[in-house]
Image (spheres, helix red, strand yellow):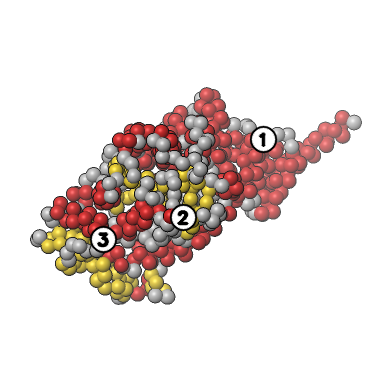
């Protein structure tokens, strides 16, 4: 087989100016909501991490009240960068409102702003049923926002503009949430080699058959090779950026520095928009404690549908320090790292915020949760239902965990291994799992699975309720209709059961199980008629 010749797309260009970033933006812009069928997102879009963020945010609200820096005439804005599928936004808003009610903080007004540069995503959120009440109440707004370029935030629903100009200045601190975003905006590579400070230049190539309309078809088939040339500081001609760069140049004897220039430029604009009162919470694939180890090897692009590069949280922390800010890194270094950055105040004078950060980042952090989740996924087939119920509680009733456990739950109920107490507890919490369902075109049908559970425990009315909800989102199919037919049959409603079974057969004429039940019900009806005739 003849080897495919490589096609060079770009030669020796500073990484931050490489076409790679445009390829990435084109991918998200084109794919819209479907991008998350290819790009992993669960670790930063589950109820557990949303609960952590919501608790930190609500304690930040309390600190603002206690420190007399909350202006009740305006809301506190919570800006989520790159909200993507909207799953995380849904969980955070929901949990924030629950905490607000339980802590009697109804007087604190907030507006949650979901942002993206992809029009398809914003349109999807605006039309999503889960957000309609929030939109109508004014606590949810949307904005098109490019992290590296935009200097103001134009809210699409209220028409309000957030910017550094005096007429648009904020009177409350700005909260910014950035998950899986800073690892996906332009970065630069620097190297210290034999005493020389060098900039990394990217050469991008791919196979000939991976190009269509001058664009790569699959980013996984891109090859990125770096060369280096001598440079000096000041490099960015910005005193704050160059001060951070100089700080790390002096710390590295031999090695590499992955410099998140796009993120820092975006943060600078957010600092201005916030009127220098900013709280930034960020979770990303990166590191904050053992950077010296990461600096020993040349950085690389990590492809996963699109691509990302590891984020050095220490550099963002140093940038905040240059501006007189403060920061907090999670205690353990793991694949997913979370850090919090403050400007305009510090953790010493924000005790409620610090306490929440220590609790939710250090005691049982997001990556720790995910490690336990992976372990339980592997050992679930050998676990008792009591353990699964406990873990569901820990996850804040995560639909993903429930869906991946439904077969085991049903099996243990059928086999008699599940105690009556555990089954009773499961019955009581199904509503919480249903409340956490957030529809995406590629979602697992959680509502159908809840219906199956209630059907298994002979709660047929409740099962039918969730089967109907399933149809509202996913449409009618023979399997859902078949199970609805079973529920009606065991409720003593044979005619309605026949209706569902016949509809299932209409959709799929080869559906044998439906045909079997139709035959059985018709035979029972004939037998009843015969008995009735004999009786007369």
- Is residue 271 rendered to the left or right of residue 418? left
What SS does tag 1 mark? Answer: helix
> In front here: 296 or 121?
121
| Residue 519 visible in the current orientation | no
Residue at 30 percent across and 67 percent down: it is 17
> In front here: 162 or 380?
162
Which residue is tagged 2?
A: 167
Residue 458, located in which quarter of the rendered image?
top right
Marked residue nearer the N-terminal end (2 or 1): 2
Which residue is tagged 3?
A: 238
Tags 2 and 1 in contact by the CB under 8 Å rule? no
Residue at 56 percent across and 47 percent down: it is 138
Cα distance in 3D space between marks 2 and 3: 27 Å
- Is residue 390 rendered to the left or right of residue 123? left
Q: Which one is in front in this view, the residue at disc 2 or the one at disc 1? A: 2
Q: Which one is in front in this view, the residue at disc 2 or the one at disc 3? A: 2
Residue 124: percent from the left, percent from the top? 54, 56
Which residue is tagged 1?
A: 461
For this orientation, the residue located farthest to the left is 194
Marked residue nearer the N-terminal end (3 or 1): 3
Marked residue nearer the N-terminal end (2 or 3): 2
Residue at 50 percent across and 45 percent down: it is 74
């Amino acid at each position: 087989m003849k080897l495919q010749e490589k096609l060079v797309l770009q030669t020796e260009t500073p990484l931050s100016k490489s076409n790679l970033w445009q390829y990435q933006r084109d991918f998200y812009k084109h794919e819209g909501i479907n991008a998350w069928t290819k790009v992993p997102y669960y670790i930063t879009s589950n109820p557990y991490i949303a609960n952590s963020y919501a608790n930190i945010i609500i304690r930040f609200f309390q600190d603002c009240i206690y420190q007399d820096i909350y202006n009740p005439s305006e809301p506190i804005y919570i800006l989520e960068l790159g909200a993507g599928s909207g799953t995380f936004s849904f969980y955070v808003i929901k949990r924030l409102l629950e905490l607000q009610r339980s802590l009697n903080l109804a007087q604190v007004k907030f507006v949650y702003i979901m942002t993206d540069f992809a029009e398809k995503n914003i349109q999807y959120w605006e039309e999503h049923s889960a957000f309609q009440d929030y939109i109508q109440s004014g606590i949810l707004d949307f904005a098109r926002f490019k992290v590296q370029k935009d200097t103001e935030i134009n809210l699409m629903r209220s028409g309000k503009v957030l910017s550094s100009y005096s007429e648009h200045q904020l009177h409350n601190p700005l909260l910014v949430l950035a998950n899986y975003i800073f690892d996906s905006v332009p970065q630069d590579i620097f190297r210290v080699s034999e005493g020389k400070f060098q900039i990394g230049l990217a050469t991008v190539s791919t196979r000939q058959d991976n190009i269509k309309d001058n664009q790569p078809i699959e980013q996984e088939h891109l090859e990125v090779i770096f060369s280096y040339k001598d440079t000096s500081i000041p490099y960015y001609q910005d005193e704050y950026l160059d001060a951070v760069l100089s700080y790390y140049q002096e710390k590295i004897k031999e090695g590499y520095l992955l410099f998140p220039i796009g993120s820092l430029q975006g943060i600078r604009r957010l600092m201005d928009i916030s009127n220098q009162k900013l709280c930034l919470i960020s979770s990303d694939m990166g590191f904050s404690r053992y950077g010296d180890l990461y600096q020993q090897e040349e950085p690389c692009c990590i492809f996963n549908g699109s691509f990302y590069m590891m984020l050095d949280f220490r550099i963002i922390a140093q940038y905040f320090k240059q501006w007189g800010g403060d920061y907090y890194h999670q205690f353990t270094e793991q694949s997913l790292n979370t850090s919090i950055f403050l400007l305009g105040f510090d953790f010493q004078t924000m005790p409620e915020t610090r306490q929440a950060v220590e609790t939710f980042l250090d005691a049982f952090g997001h990556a720790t949760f995910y490690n336990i989740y992976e372990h339980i996924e592997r050992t679930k087939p050998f676990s008792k239902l009591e353990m699964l119920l406990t873990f569901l509680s820990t996850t804040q009733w995560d639909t993903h965990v429930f869906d991946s456990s439904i077969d085991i739950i049903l099996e243990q109920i059928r086999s008699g291994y599940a105690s009556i107490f555990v089954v009773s507890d499961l019955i009581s919490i199904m509503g919480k799992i249903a409340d956490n369902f957030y529809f995406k075109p590629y979602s697992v049908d959680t509502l159908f699975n809840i219906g199956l559970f209630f059907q298994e425990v002979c709660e047929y009315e409740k099962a039918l309720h969730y089967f109907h909800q399933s149809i509202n989102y996913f449409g009618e199919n023979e399997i859902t209709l078949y199970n609805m037919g079973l529920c009606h049959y065991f409720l003593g409603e044979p005619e309605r059961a026949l209706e569902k079974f016949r509809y299932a057969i209409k959709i799929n004429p080869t559906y044998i199980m439906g045909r079997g039940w139709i035959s059985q019900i018709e035979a029972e009806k004939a037998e009843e008629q015969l008995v009735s005739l004999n009786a007369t």
